[in-house]
């Protein structure tokens, strides 16, 4: 296992994908679909667009566009809220 409980071979696979998708290079076909699937999975697991952009070496706009094209329901600014409404209701 690698960092954060992720299997090491999965980390190597992501590194290979990131290496082949150099910043500024076009991502098309199967590589684009694979990247979109990975970004969607990570975003749905709570990763921010900025974190995904940094991890893949792509721009915020590129990652945002890939997620939008994948049909992801984007979170509002500030990330996921963790029971904020419940905490406020309980205090009042």
Image (tube, helix red, strand yellow):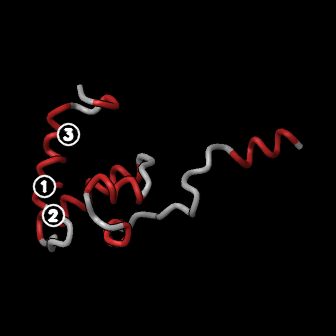
Find residue 59 and report its horizontal and vertical position in percent. 32, 67
The answer to whether residue 50 is above or below residue 5 is: below
Closest to the camera, between mark 2 and mark 3, is 2
Residue under pointer 3? 11
Does 71 appear above or below 86? below
Q: Secondary structure at mark 1?
A: helix
**Is 72 placed left or right of 33 in the picture?**
right
Give the residue drawn at x 37%, y 72%. Answer: 61
Q: In the rendered view, would you say 29 is above or below 50?
A: below
Q: Position of residue 1 (x, y in %)?
A: 23, 25
* Discs 1, 3 touching: Cβ within 8 Å: no
Say which quadrant the C terminus sits in: top right
The residue drawn where x is 29% and y is 52% is 55
Residue 5: numbered disc:
none
Tag 3 or tag 1, which sits nearer the N-term? 3
Q: Secondary structure at mark 3?
A: helix
Mark 2–mark 3 CB contact (< 8 Å): no
Horizontal arrangement in the rendering, residue 20 relative to residue 65 (left or right): left
Q: Which residue lies most toward the top here?
A: 1
Residue at the spot of label 1: 19
Viewer-side label of 1, 3: 1
Question: Which residue has dot 2 on it?
Answer: 22
Crowd class of label 2 (few under 14; some 14 to 19; many from 20; radius 10 Å): few
> Which quarter of the picture shows residue 67?
bottom left
Disc 2 to disc 1, C-alpha distance: 6 Å
- Contact (CB < 8 A) between labels 2 and 1? yes
Label 1 to label 3, Cα distance in Å?
12 Å
Q: Earlier in the sequence, mark 2 or mark 3?
A: 3
| Picture residue at 25% right of the left edge, 29% below the top | 2
Q: Is residue 36 left or right of residue 44?
A: left
Q: Callout 3: few (<14), some (14-19), or many (20+) C-alpha neighbours within 10 Å?
A: some
Which residue is at 40% across, 64% downward? 72
């Amino acid at each position: 296992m690698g960092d954060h409980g992720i299997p090491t071979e999965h980390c190597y696979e992501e590194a290979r994908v990131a290496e082949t998708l150099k910043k500024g290079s076009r991502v098309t076909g199967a590589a684009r679909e694979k990247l979109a699937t990975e970004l969607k999975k990570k975003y749905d697991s709570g990763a921010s667009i900025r974190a995904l952009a940094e991890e893949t070496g792509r721009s915020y706009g590129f990652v945002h566009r890939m997620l939008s094209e994948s049909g992801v329901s984007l979170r509002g600014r500030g990330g996921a809220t963790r029971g904020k409404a419940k905490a406020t209701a309980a205090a009042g």
